[in-house]
Amino acid sequence: MQKSLHIDANKCTGCLQCEMACSYENYGVFNIAKSRIKVFNFEHEGRKVPYTCTQCAEAWCLNACPVDAIRVDAATGAKVVAEDTCVGCKVCTIACPFGTINYVADSGKVQKCDLCGGDPACATACPTGAITYVDAEWTGLDKMRAWAGKTDSAASAA
Amino acid sequence: MAWTRKILRVDLTNGTCKSEPLNMEWAQQYLGQRGLATKYFISEVDPKVDPLSPANKMIMATGPLTGTPASTGGRYSVITKGALTGAIACSNSGGYFGAELKFAGWDMIIFEGKSPKPVYLSIENDKAELKDAAHLWGKTVWQTEEIIKKTHQDPQIRVSSIGRSGENGVMYACIVNDLHRAAGRSGVGTVMGSKNLKAVAVRGTLGLGGLKDAKGFFAAATAAKKVLADNAVTGQGLPAFGTQVLMNVINEMGALPTRNHRDVQFEGARGISAEAMAEKRPSDGKSHLVTNAACFGCTIACGRISRIDEKHFSVVNKPEYWGASGGLEYEAAWALGAANGVGDLEALQFANLICNEDGFDPISFGATVGAAMELYDLGILTKEQIGMDAPFGSAEALCKLAEMTARGEGFGKELGLGSARLCEKYGKPELSMGVKKQEFPAYDSRGIQGMGLAYATSNRGACHLRGYTVASEVLGIPIKTDPLTTDGKADLVKAFQDATSVFDSAGVCVFTTFAWTLADLQPQLNAACEGEWTMEKLAEVGERVWNMERLFNNAAGFTAKDDDLPPRLKTEAAKTGPAKGLVSGIDKMRPEYYKARGWDANGVPTKETLARLGL
């Protein structure tokens, strides 16, 4: 079963445990500047929103890459940057409509979420369940359940 | 490395920034943040120094767990000689600034001297420079953060700054980071303003790596997070209700100081409580509370984000206040509310927003308004002097006075003195409700006896964050003690003070101690930090830090006479509630406490005590 990261911004408190986990998984340091998931704070609305790559089926980044450095991980469906191939041209960063693939000056390559090979560290680290890793075909399940709960049942209609 | 092992020394007089290695021998004795920075401070500063002179220094310090995934591991503290108190000051703040400073590669920043003109410190990893702040002087905290981010074209910069109150010499000015998190008490922002230092702007992209035992650290941090999640206070009460969960509880105990401590119960408590914040307002059908929020790394998330009622008189035609913002937390709600007899939740939030926007401590401000209202009630201050009618309970006066204090206008200037200097000026020093010139927070010493001793002996003046025996006396953490008796409180206060010193030196939030004991912190520190960190060693660090602060205060001129409460709490009994008929037993507890501490009858640590602690 293919899974995908599922984000429920209403549950996010802005603690950034996800960003620390992401940077540690990929670089062995706690460094939110290197995180591939980013929490945005819409201060005056009182909203915090984690955001990262959605792993597009027809990925703009993958199609734009002139050296085929972005490949599909067959097991997870993640679009993964092959660092040994990436030349750091940044065309993918322009192509991505969501801004979720970015250049890393230290390495001269780009980076994006690769779903940690199928065990995303951000989801494990999230203390509130704002970030989960669920069946890719049922990311709408929680919303469906919420609406289902509002539907009149025969019992209450009686 | 849990410590970055680097200190940034900023000479404001000469405009220089220098890197120097952290004294690792001291780190093993004083851990970090509060303990380690205080060690630096007392080693470099004359205890008799005028807090507002260039010879005073100011340190911004992180702890070894700041910037790690340890829950709440994002704290930093500001250590200086307090403008309000003249005692050692150490004000702790959350938000994101502390972790950013650590990620830039710095354990602490030592500011010395005074800049000839307004400047701000810009840090980008190892690059640090003082920049001209002429365009920022006169701006609020909120404007300053916005302008700095725009100027640097970097929205990811974290800013810690003073508002106009810090520039204008309000004696209890804060240093505010991330818009509404503050190193709040004792006038640390006043000291910053006296140095012509407007702000510190940090961008850190180096991160933190190489903990002593990373695998062991993750195991310990994960286990400790589970302790927080499973605990009723940190797992449920604080995220749902915030610290405001206490308002009704403390009121029912008869320990909610009301109208400058004339009363111990407030008839309007429910209307300014967590429960009221969650209810829908009649005016617009929306609740005051929007959501809860966490500081960096925090898995508790006690912070309150609220939206003020747009139709409230305080914000008519002021859309800049209509958005969601920080507050109300319990101490602010009490100080702006019960302490003045004001029961208008929206008015309290407005005053709170002004405190955040222009950087002054809502506890000291609210309590000073309470003192002024009592002076008005007694006819000592007049309508003409204040510029308005200011009876107890006036929401209009509270809101106007907050704005006047922020701007340094009219009677706001006098309120900026703090209650001790204000009451002294008008010949009624006994009406200032505080210790060492710092105003009490939200617990009455008659209804919670241990807090009276904690206030009287707190090294930074009256404070709930130096020995929070409320945990034991009210919530039964770690064991329930009777709030109405003085028995056993000396040992209880000492135990809380020493343990808190360790948490404040580690880089984590003291609110973890609702669930954690030192036994939960120790495995995290031991796995993260170089050296061996046993329970015994940490307990000794806590006691050492406390005594070190005490030695500074003694050398600064404080004596046993200053470990006392205002006469009202010792002579005017609580009028209602469970504590009815009681006064504070401070005079009985004080000598017991000195004995428990290994101090002589004058509150001076004995030679044996100092030798035992390596001081």
Image (cartoon, coloured by chain):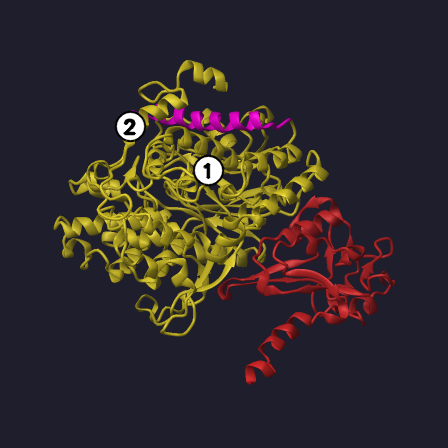
Residue at position x 59%, y 45% from top? B227
Please, what is the three-letter code of the amino acid marked with disc 2? Lys
Q: Is residue B376 inside the magenta stretch? A: no
- Looking at the image, the residue that sits furthest to the bottom is A158
Identify the chain of the residue marked 2, using the numbered disc in the image. Answer: B
Residue at position x 50%, y 41% from top? B513
**Precedes in sequence: disc 1 or disc 2:** 1
Q: Is residue B554 inside the magenta stretch? A: yes
Is B58 on the left-hand or right-hand side of A150?
Answer: left
Instruction: Please state, as top left, top right, bottom left or bottom right, where the N terminus of chain B lies in the image.
Output: top right
- How many residues crowd around disc 2 within 10 Å: few (fewer than 14), some, or many (20 or more)? few
Q: Name the residue nearer the viewer: B303 or B209.
A: B303
Determine which quarter of the picture holds residue A2.
Answer: bottom right
Real-space Cα separation, disc 1 to disc 2, in angstroms? 22 Å
For numbered disc 2, what is the local secondary structure?
helix
Query: What percent of the width, then of the height, locates residue A136?
Result: 76, 68
Please, what is the three-letter code of the amino acid marked with disc 1? Ile
Query: What percent of the width, then of the height, locates residue B248?
Result: 36, 54
In the rendered image of the structure, the colour used to display chain B is yellow
Residue at position x 35%, y 50% from top? B362
Q: Nearer the viewer, mark 1 or mark 2?
A: 1
Q: With respect to residue A116, does B443 lie above or below?
A: above
**In the rendered image, which residue does mark 2 sit on?**
B588
What's drawn in magenta, residue-wise?
B532-560
Determine which quarter of the picture holds residue B573.
Answer: top left
**In the rendered image, which residue does mark 1 sit on?**
B479
